[in-house]
Image (tube, grey):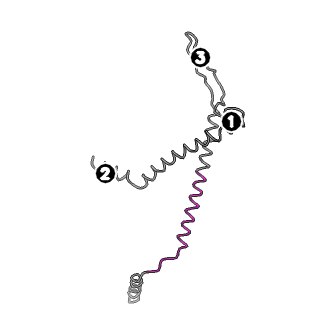
Amino acid sequence: MGKFIEDFKAFALKGNIVDMAVGVIIGGAFGKIVTSLVNDIIMPVVSIITGGDGYKNLKYVITPGRPAMGDVAAVEEVAINYGLFIQNIVDFLIIALCIFIALRYTVKFMKKEKAAEEAAPAPEPTAEEKLLTEIRDILKSEK
């Protein structure tokens, strides 16, 4: 059992696992922001354009529902809610667009940083490094 716990600690505390956990948490928060953007900003505008309640209530009723009456039990409505499907597609497209934009700027920033590192002049060798280089060169020439 002790080896199992040690292996689990080594696995759980690896840098990649921690990075992935942080990514999942940030991704969840990002998802909430995008969902709010769609539900609270975009869909009200769409509902004004469509003259209704947006896409949420668009559906094709297969069997209408009936309330309970006396001894007859209530029957729930059976419908294809294509409006919710459309809204989920809009959510997905906005999330994909936001992630694309974020990744694009991140990659652009990383390329800029890498170019700056490559363009930076190499540091001047110290006196000790110069001496070691001379000794190496002398030893190579004696062979």
Which residue does the numbered mark 2 point to in the structure image?
A: 6
Q: Earlier in the sequence, mark 1 or mark 3?
A: 1
Whether residue 57 appears in magenta in the rendering, the answer is: no
Residue at the image point whose x is 58% and y is 21% from the top: 76
Q: Is residue 99 visible?
A: yes
- What residue type is disc 3 on? Pro
Q: Secondary structure at mark 2?
A: helix
Vertical order, 83 against 29 (above or below)? above
- What residue type is disc 2 on? Glu
Q: Is residue 89 visible?
A: no
Q: Residue at the left extreme?
A: 2
- What residue type is disc 1 on? Ser
Vertical order, 127 against 89 (above or below)? below
Q: CA distance from mark 3 to mark 2?
A: 60 Å
Q: Position of residue 70 (x, y in %)?
A: 56, 10
Q: Earlier in the sequence, mark 2 or mark 1?
A: 2
Which residue does the numbered mark 1 point to in the structure image?
A: 47
User: Which secondary structure is most common in the magenta stretch?
Assistant: helix
Which residue does the numbered mark 3 point to in the structure image?
A: 67
